[in-house]
Amino acid sequence: MTDVYVRLGKRAFDIGAALILIIALSPVLLAVALAIFLDDPGSPLFRQTRVGKDKRPFRIIKFRSMRTKAPPETAAASAYSESDPRITRVGRIIRATSLDELPQLFNILAGSMSLIGPRPIVPAQLTAIRRDQEGRFRVRPGITGLAQVSGRRELAWPDQLALDSRYADKITLLGDLKIFLRTFAVVFRASDVYGDPRKNWRNFISHEDQTPP
């Protein structure tokens, strides 16, 4: 059952769930996009290169939470700071409620993401992952995952990686359903959005050669 789910069922579950959620949440998607535009005119969407399965890069889609003139690289670097003045008023709300992640449902349909899996990282974060921590790259990244329902950014970076590898080692339908349901409780609490900057990936950069032999 587990092998069948990993090979066939998980992708079917992803497509079905993404389609249902897009249809059901279409009024929310439109309302958030309008609120972003009215708060800070410009595209309500934010696109960024992330690292996915097998370390393949892809373009992630999110609702924009920063002002249009905020440099993308600075925006990524400021993700742990709630007081960053470049975050818009609407941006603070959609980050706290994780509404900024909803456009990634279209990434799921495109095949670059899954509903459940390790969160996709930015290329710079590869410098903070050792080769023995690369289990997360065996699966598609997800909108939510085991690390996200186990503490999110309150977890130290190595702990997040350990949970990501643990998930990749044992994927089951029941496990995915549990993570999916637990996600609602995490979002409802709106906690662990920014986390302790001492625990983020920049404090765990490895000097190990990241290039393949």
Image: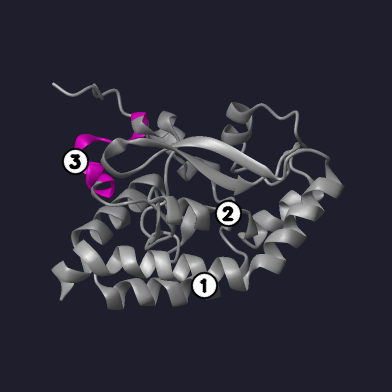
> Circle 3 sits on which residue?
132
Neighbour class for label 1 at 10 Å: few (<14), some, many (≥20)? few
Q: Quadrant of the N terminus?
A: bottom left
Q: 27 or 35: nearer the eye? A: 27
Please report the residue visible at 35 percent of the width from the left and 32 percent of the height from the top: 126
Name the residue located 61 percent from the left edge and 59 percent from the top edge.
98
Q: Nearer the viewer, mark 2 or mark 3?
A: 2
Whether residues under marks 2 and 1 lie with C-beta atoms below 8 angstroms apart, the answer is no
Task: Confirm whether the magenta stretch covers residue 16.
Answer: no
- The mark that comes first in sequence, 2 or 1, is 1
Quadrant of the rendered image containing residue 155 = bottom left
Real-space Cα distance between discs 1 and 3? 37 Å
Q: Amino acid at mark 1?
A: Ile
Disc 2 residue type (three-letter): Pro
Q: Earlier in the sequence, mark 2 or mark 3?
A: 2
Residue 64 place in picture, x, y as percent: 68, 44
Q: Which mark is residue 20?
A: 1
**Camera sees residue 171:** no
Query: How far apart in space, not on screen, are marks 2 and 3 (Cα)?
Result: 32 Å
- Residue type of the residue flagged with mark 3: Asp
Which secondary structure, mark 1? helix
| Residue under the image location 81 percent in, 50 percent down | 89
Q: Is residue 7 left or right of residue 145?
A: left
Residue 130 appears in the rendering: yes
Q: CA distance from mark 2 to mark 1?
A: 13 Å
- The residue under label 2 is 103
Label 3: how many residues lie within 10 Å, few (<14), some (14-19) or many (20+)?
few
User: Where is residue 114, by image quadrant?
Assistant: bottom left
Horizontal relation, residue 201 to residue 39: left or right: left
- State which region is magenta: 127-137
